[in-house]
Image (cartoon, helix red, strand yellow):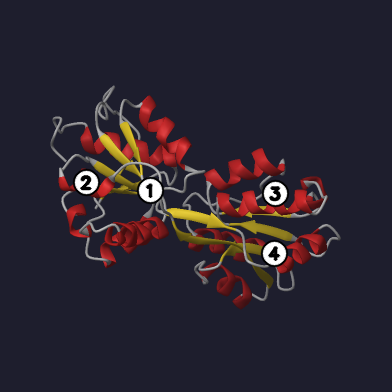
Amino acid sequence: MTVCSTAHLSEHPLQGRRIVVTQAALQAPELADLLRASGAAPLLYPCIDIRPPDDPATLDQALALATQSGFDWLVLTSTNAVCVVAQRLATLGLTPQHLAGMRVATVGASTAAAVQEQLGLAVTLTPEAAVAEALADLLVRELHPGDRVLLPQAVLARPVLANRLAAAGVVVTQVVAYDTVRGSGGGADLPNLLAQRAVDAVTLASSSAFRFLLERLTLEGSDPALLHGLCLACIGPVTARTVEEAGFCATVVAAEQSLVGMIAVLARHFQTRPEGVP
């Protein structure tokens, strides 16, 4: 596993490289544009789809309570959570400014940027490392027993953050904001491209992206073993651990846990490799 910084990259190390984007269709354009700007050819293969909960009533009730000073903190662990909160507020006829009395904490810089762009709220805390453990460390130092936290997350979100806060005496209201399911349709014919060895790298912006990548390839009659030998680029250590626990190699891991960080680590990886060498 290699962790790289953004410094001293050659001008066009990704020129002509065919790089798979596994994000959901609505999220993929940002990474695809970054890859094109770096000279790469993005191959869209959505492995994730983001769906609202079957019944949003619990989330709606929590947001309504938040507008009535029912919480001290709003903790957001993904850009998906930010988007869903913005959508539900609009559905309820509320504006993000109804939440202005709360302090906001996010897992990483991308989520913090989404909060500012979609909600117009200031972010109080964001850890340097974009993982739940780092945010938990910050919050445990900042919060007091009895503080009230609203934590909207995915159905299968890791419990580490909620558990750490609860153990510190914080009152955590954890609600389902969205579900992450396997993506389908659209994009590149990845099974055929893998068979032809016409792929240079696969980007993985979450553990779910990798798990659903394996599932989708299998359902489409491809052999996930064809991923061996490819550069698997992970956005952070949690995703890398998922890749390695499945028996694959997390070739590179972004030092800056963001899409820009993934581009940087890919550029470093391919800087000294001639075209055609993974």
Q: Residue furthest right?
A: 68
Q: Mark 1, residues whose alpha carbon is within 10 Å: few (<14), some, or many (≥20)?
A: many
In the image, residue 213 lies at what x, y percent? 33, 56
Q: Amino acid at mark 1?
A: Thr
Q: Where does label 2 land, which residue?
A: 192
Mark 2 and mark 4 lie on one chain; the one further toward the N terminus is 4
Q: How many marks?
A: 4
Report the Cα–Cα distance between label 4 and label 3: 13 Å
Q: Are marks 4 and 1 in contact (CB under 8 Å)?
A: no
Q: Which mark is residue 128?
A: none
Secondary element at tag 3: helix
Percent coordinates x, y for residue 187 in the rendering = 37, 42
Mark 3 surroundings within 10 Å by alpha-carbon count, few (fewer than 14), some (14 through 19), many (20 or more): some
Residue pointed to by mark 1: 22
Kind of residue at disc 4:
Pro
Q: Farthest top residue?
A: 11
Circle nearer the viewer, 2 or 3:
2
Disc 2, disc 4: CB below 8 Å? no
The residue that mark 4 highlights is: 56
Measure the C-alpha gap from mark 4 to mark 1.
27 Å
User: Reading the chain from its start, which is encountered first: label 1 or label 3?
Assistant: 1
- Label 2 vs label 4: CA separation? 39 Å
**Residue 148 visible here:** no
Residue type of the residue flagged with mark 3: Ala
User: Can you identify the residue that label 3 sits on?
Assistant: 86
Residue at the (13%, 30%) spot, across then down: 274
For residue 193, side relative to residue 277 (left or right): right
Q: Which of marks 1 and 2 precedes in the sequence?
A: 1
Amino acid marked by disc 2: Asn
Of the image marks 4 and 1, the number of the one nearer the N terminus: 1
